Amino acid sequence: MKILVTGGMGYIGSHTVVELQNAGFEVVIVDDLSNSSADIRDAIAQITGIKPVLEVFDLIDKEKTQDFFKRHNDIKGVIHFAAKKAVGESVQKPLTYYRNNLESLINVLEGMNENNISNFVFSSSCTVYGQPDELPVSESAPIKKAESPYGNTKQISEDIIFDTIKVTDLKAIALRYFNPIGAHETALIGELPLGVPDNLLPYVTQTAIGIREKLNVFGEDYNTPDGTAIRDYIHVVDLAKAHVIAVQRMIDNEMKKDFEVFNLGTGNGFSVLEVIKSFEKVTGLKLNYQIVGRRAGDVEQVWADSSFSNKELGWKAEKGLDEMTGSAWMWEQAYRQKT
Ligand code: UFG
């Protein structure tokens, strides 16, 4: 059964391709390689024994997207990762973010519609909840005004999908990710941030390996037990597995309604200092860090109520924080040895 994975060369995409292939799906990737490298395909092949088909083009190109779907009209489902995802960059370049993330989504949905492909899994984010009024946050929590153009593209995308479902045969599952970190156990694929990382874990591992001098911990005056901000970190392989389950659920006609939304988190919140402690414990290294002021736009604390995903998808995050920080470190070391 053939599945299109857009953005399948990226961080979450590549781990999902591995899990899909392990589950017996045939995968076709579309990726413009704007934030990934073609070598990832060889790494995937090393892990699974199968080199996925890759077509390199930008999904904001409507003609190329239409042509792709005509040639692959036997696709049974689409997992749509391809999008820009840097919160800070989106504030600086809003139009780039709106054009890229929304036009590509529209082109993919049109291509699916024209070729009678109805199963769509969308890569959404817990950013749609902002700072929730209640913790843990469940899928029924209100959507808060987005803090960034990036976050707004996720909200608008969910609306576009919902409106399309009302008038077409499309069915969709939106997966709202909490904070994916870690890497595949083989250390052959992982997160490859371009330039200076924005996110915590790549910054931690790059500091430990000596590329960055010091990690800045943004704020210790939050209303949390140790004063640093709390997130629900989830191992990227656990996250990837949920996509396989979502696709299978659609193919098996097990959906309860045509648009389903699921939180993907562990249900546990950890502070920035707890993440650092886990990293130091697992690696035996001392991390060079300093406390600085808060980062603009950060929420204080957020973690998932994953009970609906656990029950409905029969999915549960299995890997703990130490496995996440440990695998991120294995990946950083393996990657730097190659380059
Ligand atoms: N942090 C630091 N120092 C750093 C980087 C991060 O202290 O150098 C802190 C942040 O202040 C935050 C925590 O580590 O408290 C996690 O920050 P990340 O940047 O790793 O993740 P965010 O929670 O800010 O953002 C992530 C994704 C977004 C997504 C968002 C949803 O990167 O794509 O979750 O909440 F929208």
Image (tube, rainbow, N blue to C red):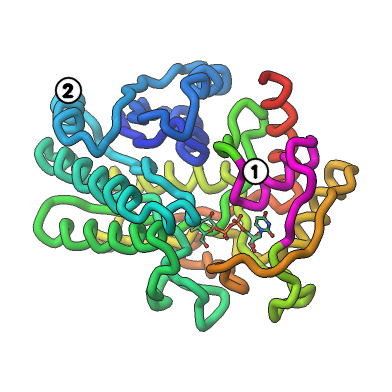
Seen at 33% across and 58% down, the residue is 153
If the picture is divided into quarters, which one holds ligand 1? bottom right
Seen at 47% across and 72% down, the residue is 130
Q: Rounded to the nearest whole Å, what is the CA distance between mark 1 and mark 2? A: 35 Å
Residue 84: image x %, image y %? 41, 46
Q: In the rendered structure, which segment of residues is drawn in magenta? A: 196-217
Mark 2 neighbour density, 10 Å: few (under 14) some (14–19) many (20 or more): few
Q: Mark 1 points at which residue?
A: 182
Q: Which amino acid does label 1 sit on?
A: Gly
Q: How many marks?
A: 2
Mark 1 neighbour density, 10 Å: few (under 14) some (14–19) many (20 or more): many
- Left or right of 3? Residue 17 is right
Seen at 12% across and 36% down, the residue is 115
- Identify the mark at residue 228; answer none if there is no mark: none
Residue 285: image x %, image y %? 88, 43
Q: Which amino acid does label 2 sit on?
A: Arg
- Left or right of 82? Residue 337 is right
Depth order, front residue of 208/179: 208
Q: From what the image shows, is residue 267 above or below residue 109? A: below
Q: Name the residue under label 2.
A: 71
Q: Which of marks 1 and 2 is nearer the N terminus?
A: 2
